[in-house]
Amino acid sequence: MTLDSRLRSRCRDRGAATAELVLVVPLLMVLLLCIVQFALAAHAQHIAQTAASRALAAARAQDGSAADGHARAVATLRLLGGRVLTQPTVNVARGATSVTAEVHGGVLMVVPGLHLRVAGHATGPSERWTR
C-alpha cells in the first residue's frame, strides 16, 4: 500500500464520527427523557396511593365519613402532589361495612405526546360497634 492510497482511504472516512453523533445524540436524549418520564410516573403513582390510603384511614374511623376521607385526600395531594400529579380526582364511598377510596390523575408531561395516567385504590372495613 502506497502513501497515496493510505491518504485517500483516510479522506473517505473523514466526517464519519460527526454523522454518527448527529444520529445517536437525539436518540440518547429521547431515551433520557423517557427514563425521566417513567420515574415521574412512578412517583405520581406513589402519591396517588398514599392519598387513597390516608383517605381510607380517615373515612373508616368510627365517626368518620366519606367527606372526612375526601378532605384528607385533598390535603395529602396538596402537600405531596405538587405539579407531578396533574388534575387529581378523589372518590370516597363509605358503606355500612366497607370504605373505598380512589385517586386518579395524570402525570406531568416531559415527553411531548406521552399522556400517562395513574390511580391509587384502597378498600377496607369500616369501624363500627358489633354485638
Image (cartoon, rainbow, N blue to C red):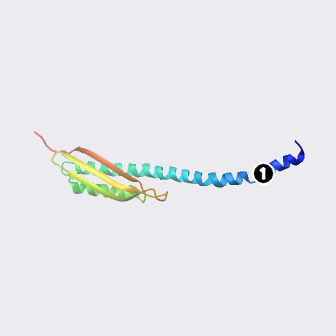
Within the image, what quadrant is residue 88 found in?
bottom left
**Could you say which quadrant of the image residue 26 lies in?**
bottom right
Residue, x 29% and y 56% (percent of image)? 90
Q: Estimate the x, y position of residue 121 in percent, counting from the top left.
A: 30, 48
Q: Position of residue 46 (x, y in %)?
A: 39, 48
**Which element is circle 1 on?**
helix
Q: Residues within 10 Å of mark 1 (few under 14, many from 20)?
A: few
105 left or right, relative to 65 = right
Question: Which residue has dot 1 on it?
Answer: 12
Residue at left offset 43%, top offset 48%: 42
Quadrant, the C terminus: top left
Viewer-side residue, 97 vs 62: 97
Q: Is residue 98 above or below residue 70?
A: above
Which amino acid is tagged 1? Answer: Arg
**Rendered residue at 55%/50% (across/down):** 31
Q: Nearer the viewer, residue 66 or 106?
A: 106
Please state, as top left, top right, bottom left or bottom right, where the N terminus lies in the image. Answer: top right
Rendered residue at 47%/50% (across/down): 38
Q: Is residue 13 left or right of residue 120?
A: right
Q: Give left or right: position of 97 versus 50.
A: left
Q: Position of residue 92 (x, y in %)?
A: 25, 53
- Total residue callouts: 1
Q: Residue 67 location in percent, x, y?
A: 23, 57
Q: Between residues 7 and 28, which one lies in front from this camera angle?
A: 7
Residue sitting at the far left: 131
